[in-house]
């Protein structure tokens, strides 16, 4: 049984919805800002739903009044769609809870969430999933099921973590946003990701 209840939409169904995960090898300042920037670029001319994979913690949430409703949704008592709020032409599915978050979910519950996201996603051309590294089980689950993009924190310590994350998920590419191409960190990632094939993304729209 799915943990969420979904209401069917009467809107025209869009086909071939693209599901894409945004994540990072570790938490860093500006990560959420980068997620919003990517969402804004990908939403140009398309309908986009941004799903907060920290649901319950509310990393992307701007509406603290949703806390009670988020708990009810996480418990399967209310619909996932009721959390959607429109922000700058992007539909956002996020919220806080004092007691629950997706990190506490069992594997069957995560699969139930996956089914409900796919059902909800038919109303959009793109579903962008924010998968925080602070919830490794959630990050792993979504990266195993969808194409994903890694937003690395450019420090010498994060290079090995970035390459390790990329090695774990063959469908992941690395987005080098605002990185100096003559820098040592850039070259290290460029060399590490060029074998066996180039998995570097220079433009989020690629």
Image (spheres, rainbow, N blue to C red):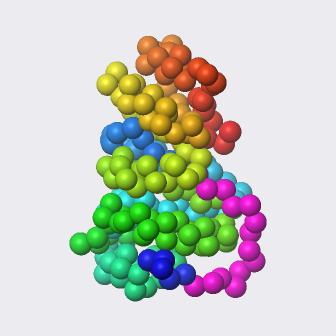
Q: What is the x, y in percent for residue 130?
A: 46, 54
* The stretch drawn in magenta includes residue 132: no
Q: Main secondary structure of the magenta part?
A: loop
- Looking at the image, the residue that sits furthest to the left is 98
Residue drawn at x 50%, y 82% is: 5
Q: Is residue 39 above or below residue 167?
A: below
Would residue 175 be seen by someone viewing this image from the given angle? no
User: Who is closer to the viewer here, 196 or 99?
Assistant: 196
Is 47 situated left or right of 6 in this image?
right
Q: What is the x, y in percent for residue 30?
A: 37, 43
Residue drawn at x 74%, y 61% is: 16
Q: What is the x, y in percent for residue 181?
A: 53, 18
Residue drawn at x 35%, y 66% is: 105
Mark count = 0
User: Who is closer to the viewer here, 80 or 85?
Assistant: 80
Q: Quadrant of residue 43?
A: bottom right
Q: Quadrant of the C terminus?
A: top right
Would residue 48 be seen by someone viewing this image from the given angle? yes
Q: Is residue 178 above or below residue 118?
A: above
Q: Is residue 164 above or below residue 16?
A: above
Where are the magenta residues, as a range? 7-20
Residue drawn at x 40%, y 44% is: 31
User: Who is closer to the viewer here, 186 or 135?
Assistant: 135
Q: What is the x, y in percent for residue 173?
A: 57, 36
* The stretch drawn in magenta includes residue 12: yes
User: Who is closer to the viewer here, 18 or 116?
Assistant: 116
């Amino acid at each position: 049984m799915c943990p969420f209840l979904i209401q069917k939409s009467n809107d025209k169904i869009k086909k071939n919805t693209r599901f894409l995960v945004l994540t990072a090898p570790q938490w860093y300042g500006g990560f959420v800002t980068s997620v919003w920037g990517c969402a804004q670029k990908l939403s140009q001319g398309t309908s986009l739903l941004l799903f907060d994979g920290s649901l319950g913690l509310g990393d992307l949430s701007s509406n603290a009044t949703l806390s009670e409703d988020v708990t009810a949704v996480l418990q399967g008592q209310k619909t996932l769609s009721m959390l959607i709020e429109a922000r700058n032409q992007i539909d956002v599915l996020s919220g806080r809870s004092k007691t629950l978050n997706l990190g506490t979910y069992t594997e069957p519950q995560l699969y139930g969430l996956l089914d409900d996201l796919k059902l909800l996603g038919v109303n959009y051309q793109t579903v962008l999933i924010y998968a925080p590294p602070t919830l490794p089980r959630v990050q792993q689950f979504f990266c195993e099921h969808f194409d994903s993009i890694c937003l690395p924190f450019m420090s010498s310590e994060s290079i090995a973590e970035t390459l390790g994350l990329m090695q774990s998920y063959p469908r992941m590419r690395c987005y080098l946003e605002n990185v100096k191409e003559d820098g040592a960190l850039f070259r290290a990632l460029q060399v590490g990701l060029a074998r066996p094939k180039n998995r570097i993304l220079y433009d989020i729209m690629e």
